[in-house]
Amino acid sequence: MSQQVEDEALLDATQACVLAVGVRRTTMTDVARRASVSRMTLYRRYADVTSLLQALMTREFTQIIGEVGREVEGLPSARERLVSAAVVGVDRLTRHPLFLRIVDVDPELLLPYLTTRRGAFQRAAVEVFEARLADGVREGSIAVDDPAAAARTIELSLRGFAFQALAPGAERERAQELAELGRLLDRYLAP
């Protein structure tokens, strides 16, 4: 079994544990058992449950970035692609079972991502936004002075929106809020 395949199996087992019992009750022993590997094999790859969870969230949430990016490629302008990807991406993230489980059972684990930490997923989103912003500036569909600063600003805005979108509410309100988010981004980026 290659290391990449084995790592995927370990992350799959981690996700199964987190979905079953939450982050705080997930143990390295449980993950090793679910993955049918020894604890030593698990510890050779990951120091602890926190590093496993970080790797899992990065894998799951960056997959969303890739999927959404492929879905919007046919849109005519970089601005339309960025706005659509941002809105669909934040919606998809807030519906992801892993994200929902963490928010439901262990919400305090997300606090650093709101206040002091830009994790691997957020950095990946900023990279994608920066590239799309630069494309839009070149083609003339986006007017920002500094694509890197604008990318960080968009990610911060979406981060706040994602956590607010978790508040209980009607599906109709959520659709309206997502539409408004799209309008907000579109007007911010428009030349």
Image: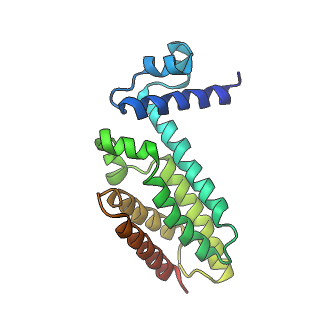
Left or right of 128? Residue 39 is left
Q: How is the image coloured?
A: rainbow
For the question of whether residue 106 can be seen, the reply is: no
Q: Nearer the viewer, residue 148 or 42?
A: 42
- Residue 42, horizontal then vertical, whole percent: 53, 20
Q: Nearer the viewer, residue 29 or 55?
A: 29
Q: Quadrant of residue 82?
A: bottom right
Q: Is residue 183 visible?
A: yes
Query: Toward which corner of the image does residue 102 lie, by quadrant?
Result: top left
Say which residue appears at 33% left-offset and 64% top-offset: 170
Q: Which image quarter holds the N terminus? A: top right
* Residue sitting nearer the eye, 139 or 31: 31
Count numbered badges in the picture: 0
Name which residue lies at 33% across and 30% down: 24
Q: Residue at x 46, y 62 (%)?
A: 155
Residue under the point 51% across and 21% down: 34
Q: Which quadrant: the C terminus?
A: bottom right
Please, is residue 157 above or below residue 66 in the view?
Answer: below
- Where 133 sits versus 25, above or below? below
Measured from the top left, where is residue 172 in percent x and y?
Answer: 37, 69
Image x and y of residue 162, in percent: 39, 59
On screen, 10 above or below 79?
above
Where residue 53 appears, as percent x and y from the top left, is 45, 35
Q: Is residue 20 left or right of residue 65?
A: left
